[in-house]
Structure formats: structure tokens, C-alpha cells
Amino acid sequence: MDAEGPPTLCDLCLAQVCQSLSSLCSMRADGSMSLIWAPVFPQETADQLLNHMAAKEILNDTTVGIFRSCKELRLRRASIQSCPLSAEAFRLALCPHRLLELDASWVSGGLTGADIVSGLASNPECRSSLQRLSLSGLRLDWESLEANGGIHVGFSSLRGLRMLNLANTDLNDAALEDICNLPHLETLDISCSAISKLTALLECKNTLRSLIAHRQRHLDMSPAQLLFVFSQLHALKHLDFSEDHFSVDDSDGRDGDETVRQLLEGSPQVLPSLVSLDISGRKRISEAAIRSFVESRSGLVFLGLLATGVSSCDFFSTQKSLKVTGEADENQVCEALRRYRDRECFIREALVHLYSLTTDTDKPQPDVLKVQKNCLLALCSDYILQEVPFDKYLAAMLVINWLSSHEDPTLQRMAVAVISILVAKLSTEEMAQFSKDIFIMKQLLAIVQQKAMVGVVDSTLKFALSALWNLTDEMPVAARNFIECRGLELYEEVLESYYTEPSIQQKVLGLLNNIAEVEELQADLMEEDILEHILSLLQDSQVDVGVRYFAGGILAHLASRPDAWTLENELRSTVLKQLHDSIMTWTHLEREMVSYRSFHPFCPLLQTCQPAGVQLWAVWAIHLVCTQNTSHYSSMLEKEGLTELLKALAAHPSTHSDIKGLSDSVLSMVEQHQIHAGAFNNQTAPQRS
């Protein structure tokens, strides 16, 4: 159930139809689907089915075939936004319907604007019935249609059109002239197009009520010419002449800025009936001009002023009915976030100001919370987290601080997921700084405790455990903070209560490995109960190898320092024997289970004076990661001097044969990597003539 309530019965039924299409349909010879049997759907339900299929990303050349049955599935308001459809599938499935509205924004699959217009115009009913058409993000591509023998049928053939969205297309002056011959055109969006002249708009000056002309980078008209066109649009109530100020230098957009200045400072007889004006991103606007413009147009209810520098004008405090996008206060910023969802330049600007305005606030703000939820959703993208360059340290700090004041389970899960990945991406220096903050440790441990108290196994718990594991990796300060926050006691409980959950146990034992690597903290792990529990995990052949691996790591580190061992010597002897016996039964793991920042913690374990069980665990671990990522770890072994330790271990007369065999195998991998790397460098090196 979402915040708006449970899904309707109709939605549930349509969802079931979408899931069952393959069993409800037969296949035509051309590979498209056809319903085996269908009643006559209520007209609105047919529209909803199409919209559901598009939203679930299952609408394509195959599935759209069910809408060729025009009698049973009568479409009127169709949305195929972002769907992969070919021109032929569109023509056969959608063009026969008596459509009132069509949203074909950002469709893929080779479908062009020209294909859509010519297809719709081939249906005499559509020529008069279609009132709203959105082709945003498409290539119109009339040339290809004509080259393939098609007839150039312009927008003016769709005589019923009242709303036309051609934003982000290759719309040109000739096509605009054709469009402006439409007898009923009321709303036109030509944002980010290739238009150089707006003079054609004079042809529809008595019908055009809304003009959206954001980011008109190719306009070639003087301010006087532009202002004349605007002044003749007698029916215009909504004008958007905003600009993307991020991608415009001082020389670009100057005529547009001057046009806006003259409009604001000019006669109130120009666009006297204007209800909304958006000039966000425009430069050289004065507060006095804004005041004069608003005062002379009593019907104005919206003014877009984001990134203009004048949204903080005191005059707005007296205009209670006027909505403004800007950066002066939270109301203006939130209005910008609501209105500019499809404009990256403005959303980015608004989010920066929202952060500045809400950093120190302590009152609940539902609207702001929804913006923050969207930010977390964006950050949760694998591509953004893994590929996009941004300040990951700052982002991690912002998310952890935000987490402290929000308990919504969905938001908590997303926040913890983001933190767990960001922490692993920090540099050593950033990680050292991040790990010093004991508040971060308390926040993450509180989430683990909250989940462990009810015994739940979910992604939030797993992400929190991963974050703690990464946070303590070769970070003694963080490991000390973990102990001081009573993390050991909590983790002992988690180990016992989640005995059948290897994914949980691995993360718990992985962190305890990090603590065991720090010599001054090993004494905190010298408790008989917890060590015997870890030993039982090592010995149990029914336990996942990944769990036994980390259990072995803890025991190997603790047993490697006999002088620091404070428990019974008999227990240490048992640990050393079981390490060797257990490791020799482990099967090789194909999946990547662990990654290491460095091999420095392994150096003490690889000394020739160490017991065989300790040496074997260290060499087995190195062998594991080297087989999974030979290039990365071979270079690390060389750089950190571990190849010399392995050579010494393999050559020492008292080294166990099992350890010698694994050591030789690792050294062989390193040698092969060096040979391949050398050969590659020789091939790619410039040749002398």
C-alpha cells in the first residue's frame, strides 16, 4: 500500500491481464499478439490497459498487436511514452482508432514523428478527432519518410489538434509554418527545438492560449521582432520563455534576455491577459520591472523567476495569490521542484537551494521529505553510485545525518543502502575522517539492534551490516568506536540468533575479522564463549563456506600471537588444528565474497614462524581473491611485497606441503600476469620507424 491508498480493483485486474498476456493470446504470422477471446472493454478500461502495459515496460511490437482489435479494445486517450515500437506496429495497432489524445514522447524502436503524423492522418476519423498530440524527444524526420516513398503529410492535416508538444525535436521553421495553420491550436510547446523564427505564430494569434518556448537556442530575431510577435498574440494567457542559464555564456541568449527586459518594462497593453509568465534563467532583470509588470496585470497567478536573481523581491510578500518559482524561500523552491520535473537545469538549481534552506531546520516538512525521497531514489541507482563522479564523502555525511531524523522504513532502507556503497567508495583518507565520527557508528548499530530485536531479515539489516563492515576495514579508530558502542555484545547476539542465515553471518564475521586484525583490540575478542561459537562455525561442514572462511580469519589472527593469547592454551591448540583440517575441506568459491583494500593485515600471518593453520588460512584467502581478480590482486601483491613473503614461505623447509602448493599457485598466477602485461605493453608501445 502506498501513501495514496491501496490499488483499485480495476488496477489489480489490469495488472493480472498484463502478467497473463502470453496465455490469453495467440500469435499472428508477423509475430504480434492477438487476444484469443475478449469482451467489448469499457472504453476507459482499454486506455488504462494500454497505459498499464506502457508503465510496466511490456508494450512493444509483439504485445501492442492486441489493440488491432478495434471493436473490443477502443482507444481514445493513448500513451506509448518511451515504448519500443516500430512504424509498422504503430500503424497497424493504433492508427485505426478514433483517438482524442496520443502521448508518444521519447518512443524508441525507430518510430519517427513523421511516421506518427502520416499514420494518424491515414485515418479520416483521426484527422478530425485528435485533439492532443505529444511527440517530445522524437526525430520528426520528414526526409526519411519521403525517401522511402511516403507522402509528406504535415501537422495541418490533423485539423482537430488543440495541443501539440514538440519539445526536444528537430522542429524547423517550415514545419512551424505548417503547424500554425491549424484552425483550433491552443497550446504549443516548441522548447529546445531548431526554430529560428517565430513569425509564423502570427497565423494562430487568435487561438493560441499557451506558448512554451524554453531554451530557444537557435532563434535569429531581434528583440524588437520578438516583442512584436508576442504583442500580437491576443489570446495568449501562458508564456514560457525561460532559459537554461547553466549552458549559456554571456554572449548567448542576449537577444532573448533583452526581449524579456523590454516586455517587463514595456507597455501594459502587451499581453494584458497573461495569467502565467516563466522567465526562469533569464539575465538582466530588475526588481522594479518585475513589480511594474505584476501590478499592471491583475490576473497573473504564476511567475517563474528561478535563477534570475530577483525572486527575493520584498514586493512578493504582498502578493498572496501569486505563485513564484525562485530561491528566496522554501515555498518558491518547492514550487520549482513541482513545476520543473522535466528540466534538469532547474531541478539541480532548486535542490541546491533546498539544501541550503533546510540544513538546520527541525520541523516536519512533508513536501520536502518527498523531494529527499526522490534524491535517495536517484542515489540508489547503481550507475550513479558506481560510475558518476561526485563528492561521495559529502554525500555519505549528508545521508547519515539525514538518517538520524527519519524513521520511515522505505527511506531508511534507501539511505542505508546508499551509505553502505558510498563508504566502500571513499579514499583511505576520506574513510579515516569518516570513521572517526562515533555518531555514525551509533546510527548504524541502532538500525542493526532495531532489526535484530524482532528477528527480521531484510535488505535494511544487510545494508547496515555491510556499511559497518566497510567502515571498520583497516580503520582501527572505527573498530574502537564499534567496541565502545557495545557492538561486540550486539554482534554476539546476532550471530546466535541468525544461525541459519549465512548472508547475515558473513557480514557479522567480516567485521569481527576487521577487529581481529588490530593487535591492540584483539584482547576484546578474547572471550571463551564467543570464540567457541566461532570455532563451532569453522568446524561445521554443514555451514556455508563463506561463513567458515570468515570464522577462520578471526581465529587465525587471534591465534597468530601466542603472547597475547589469554585463554587456555588447549583452546589455541584446538583452533590451530581445526583451522588446517577445516580449510583443506573447503571448495573453491566462484562468486566474489570479499575484497581487500590491501594485504597489509596478512603480513604477520605469512611469517615462516607462524603455525601451519594460520599460514594456510592467509594463503588460501590470497589464492581465493587472486583467482577471482588476478590482475588487481597480482599487482597488489607485488606492490606490497607479499610475493617475497610467499616465496620465503614456499622455500622454507618446515612449511607444510599444503601451504607450499597454494603459495606456488599464487606465485604462478602473479608470474603469468606479469608475462601477459608485458606482452600487452609491447604490442601497444609506439614502434620506431
Image (cartoon, rainbow, N blue to C red):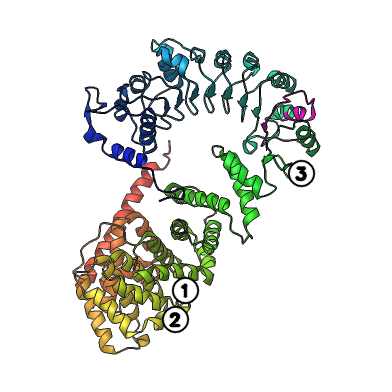
Q: Please indicate, yes or no, whether residue 655 appears anywhere in the rendered image.
A: no
Q: Which residue is pictured at 40% across the width and 19% down the height?
A: 98
Q: Tell which of 274 and 333 is nearer to you.
A: 274
Which of the marked residues, 1 or 3, is nearer the chain's N terminus? Answer: 3
Residue 67 falls left or right of residue 344? left
Marks 3/2: CA distance? 66 Å
Contact check, label 1 and label 2, Cβ < 8 Å: yes
The residue beneath circle 1 is 476
Tell me the magenta residue range: 260-284
Q: What is the quadrant of residue 583 in the picture?
A: bottom left
Q: Tell which of 307 and 33 is nearer to you.
A: 33
The residue beneath circle 2 is 520
Identity, as a three-letter code, of the amino acid under mark 1: Pro
The residue beneath circle 3 is 318
Q: Position of residue 298 (x, y in %)?
A: 74, 32
Q: Position of residue 236 (x, y in %)?
A: 66, 23
**Vertical side of 275 occupied by 664: above or below:** below
Q: Position of residue 234 (x, y in %)?
A: 69, 19
Marks 1/2: CA distance? 9 Å
Marks 1/3: CA distance? 58 Å
